[in-house]
Image (spheres, rainbow, N blue to C red):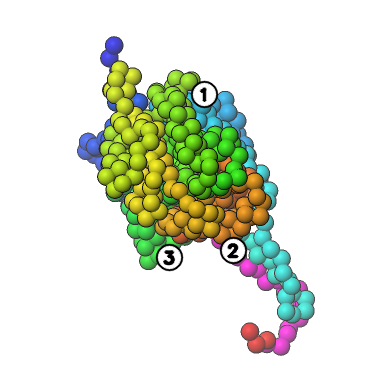
Amino acid sequence: MQQTITTFKNNIGGTLTDSSVRAGSPSPYFEKYNPADKNELLGKFPKSSQKDLDEAVKEAKKAFEIWRYTPAPKRAEVLYKAAEITRDQKEELSKILTKETGKPIVEARGEIQEVIDTYLFFAGEGRRIYGLTGQSELRDKSIITIRQPIGICGLITAWNFPSAVPSWKIAPALVSGNVVILKPSKDAPMSGYKLVENLYKAGLPKGCASILFGTGEFGDLIVRHPDIKVISLTGSVEVGKQIYETCGKMLKKCALELGGKNAIIALKDANQDLLLDGVLWGAFGTTGQRCTSTSRLIIQKSDWSDTFIEKLANAAKKLKVGNGLNESTQVGPVITDSHRNNIHGFVERATKAGAKLICGGNKLTGKEFDNGNFYEPTIISNVKADMELACTEVFGPVLAVIPVKDELEAIKVANNVEYGLSLSIYTKDINIAMKAANEFESGIVYINAPTIGAECGGAAAFGGWKNTGNGTREGGVMALDTYTQYKTVYIDYSNKLQRAQID
């Protein structure tokens, strides 16, 4: 049976537009394949041009002049409706997500639920975009500070959470009164397409959101466009630094969520059963392809530490690897074959440097695996704190085990990387746990839980320290800081002339 290939179009301000038609000449496309079955072509997507971007910006500028003055509670109604539509489509959207990323369907459902929750949370913020009031130095004078939108926001997102991460950016941007242009990763373009489509179904006015497909070069066009006032990126450290430099020169607001090299510290008094579950989920959930994945286990030497590593390896070997659409699958494929080769290179170099391969370390082959990018859940022990595997982000199902003598050394090793996203400690000693939480150089800390599992509630800010970002936050009320600017208003109600005051 011949496969029907869908050729996608850009959605510019609510209108599906084929860039090749508008450009007057054939436009090149990139193809997206299922990472679990490389014979399945999921769609063809346009490599957008400067003309496409200019058209989206033109529509966005017109829409902003209307949307910015729409009352925030009214803007919130679009997000409430979008949450309802997403809930109704949850299974359909989950299957799309699994096909394009490879993640198990159970995880995909969780991601779509996060979109729903994010929309609902920021819809609520439509009635809580608070400013400040203050006391003046003068009589008969008041001061109020209000938040206002900034303009067009360029949103550049990664492939590993192609629904949740765009929603983290879109929802606070829209409810604040901004308009958005989304560029999803070329490795996961379909989920973002559905997000924008559903926003318009929810009643978003024409022009307020666009999605343009393209490669990294097109992302650079977005960053450099003078009419785009905010840039939000989820991506690599290298790309983040380049964008930060460009935004600095153009005085653009910039939010960066970059890499991570996260660790679980396991002390000798840890609950071993809880630890085992936490390490398995933290290291191999989403096939290790989360910026918060547990890629290091820093374990205190004890009378049970070696036995625990054996138990962990046995449990990892039992994880069901396969196509994410299978309900029993626990570990899906990695996103591309080239990425799988990179992962394997980390493993080979680590073992050559003296680390010990405990389990895994192979590209999976056989009937179920030959057409996909599957890699075994891998554990490598005797890793030294200064080895490449202990310091560099792998972004795959590979766990480095680093032995330490005590909690002081453990905290030092945990902090001994360029990243600072998520760190965890397992211990029954609340004093040590709180000391670690205070000394960890990371934006997120877990106690007796793995390094993954972000929420979208008011206090659940997501972001990191050091090379993980530039101090901005996603999720929670702090995300509004990226998409709003402050205005201070002085009100003089004395109704009479006053002597000039010295500032």
Res. 334 image quadrant: top left
Outermost residue, left side: 25
Circle 2 SS class: strand
Indicate whether 493 appears above or below 468. Answer: below
Q: Foreground: 262 or 315?
A: 315
Of the image marks 1 and 2, the number of the one nearer the N terminus: 1
Q: Quickly name the residue at label 3.
A: 251
Res. 35 image quadrant: top left
Q: Foreground: 41 or 392?
A: 392
- Mark number, residue 52: none
- Which residue is at a point 53% across and 40% down the rendered structure image? 304
- Which residue is at a point 53% across and 58% down the rendered structure image? 408
Q: Quickly name the residue at label 2.
A: 486
Tag 1: residue type? Glu
Q: Nearer the viewer, mark 1 or mark 2?
A: 1
Indicate whether 292 appears above or below 39. Answer: below
431 sits left or right of 413 in the view: right
Of the image marks 2 and 3, the number of the one nearer the N terminus: 3
Q: Position of residue 338 (x, y in %)?
A: 27, 37
- Which residue is at a point 59% across and 55% down the rendered structure image? 437
The residue carrying pointer 2 sits among few (fewer than 14), some (14 to 19) or many (20 or more) residues within 10 Å by Cα, namely some
Question: Residues under labels 2 and 3: Cα distance?
Answer: 16 Å
Q: Position of residue 22 (x, y in %)?
A: 29, 39
Question: Residues under labels 3 and 1: Cα distance?
Answer: 42 Å
Of the image marks 3 and 1, the number of the one nearer the N terminus: 1
**Magenta segment range?**
482-500
Q: Quadrant of the C terminus?
A: bottom right
